[in-house]
Image (cartoon, grey):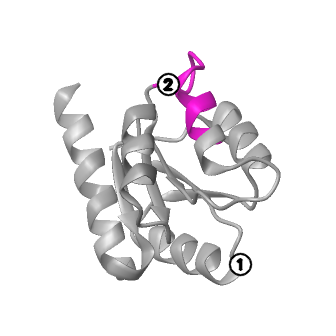
Amino acid sequence: MPERKVLVVEDDDFLLEMYSTKLELEGFKVYNATNGVQGLKVAQREEPDLILLDLNLPEMSGFEVLEQLKNTDNTKNILVVVLTNYSQKDHIDRCLDLGADDYLIKAHFVPSEVISKIKKLLDEKDAQK
């Protein structure tokens, strides 16, 4: 099975490092970005299997990143899991309308649960191939 690639777009260094390490320990090839513009560039260059995307980012919000990803041919089919502190229903609805595959509120999930969700989404996508 080819190595699965995950891009973590998160401006909090602690969370970025924690998720990157946990994903690497699970056998993923991990790319990091600390702002929206960088996240978009890495996504277009590396075409990861999944993007873990924060909404509150410098330079370009997660909403803008998500919208551009879903409107660009080579990135529109990448799975996107929004991982944020925003729990407002309108934020959730907006992300899902823009094409996010899942919406996780940081405070409600421990990292191992986030990793499990990522694996589940990737397994489902592989099963559809």
Q: Whole-percent x and y of residue 47? A: 58, 34
Query: Image check: 124 left or right of 34?
Result: left
Q: Whole-percent x and y of residue 106? A: 44, 75
Task: Reply above or below: 49 against 18.
Answer: above
Residue 8: which quarter of the image? bottom right
Asked whether 75 falls inside the magenta stretch, the response is yes
Q: Secondary structure at mark 2?
A: loop
Residue at (57% x, 20% y) in the render: 71
Q: Which residues are magenta?
A: 65-76
Task: Reply above or below: 53 against 126.
Answer: below
Q: Inspect this view and state whether residue 37 appears.
A: yes
User: Looking at the image, which is closer to me, 100 or 112?
Assistant: 100
Query: Image check: 9 left or right of 121?
Result: right
**Mark positioned earlier in the residue sequence (1 or 2):** 1
Task: Reply above or below: 63 against 28.
Answer: above
Residue placed farthest to the top in the image? 73
Residue at (56% x, 38% y) in the render: 66
Amino acid carrying label 2: it is Lys
Count of residue discs? 2
Residue placed farthest to the right in the image? 59
Quadrant of the snapshot with the C terminus: top left
User: What residue does disc 1 label?
Assistant: 13
Report, in whole angstroms, how far the alpha carbon at label 1 lies from the one at label 2.
27 Å
Query: Image check: 13 left or right of 93?
Result: right
Residue at (42% x, 64% y) in the render: 27
User: What residue does disc 2 label?
Assistant: 76
Query: Image check: 96 left or right of 70?
Result: left
Residue 34: which quarter of the image? bottom right
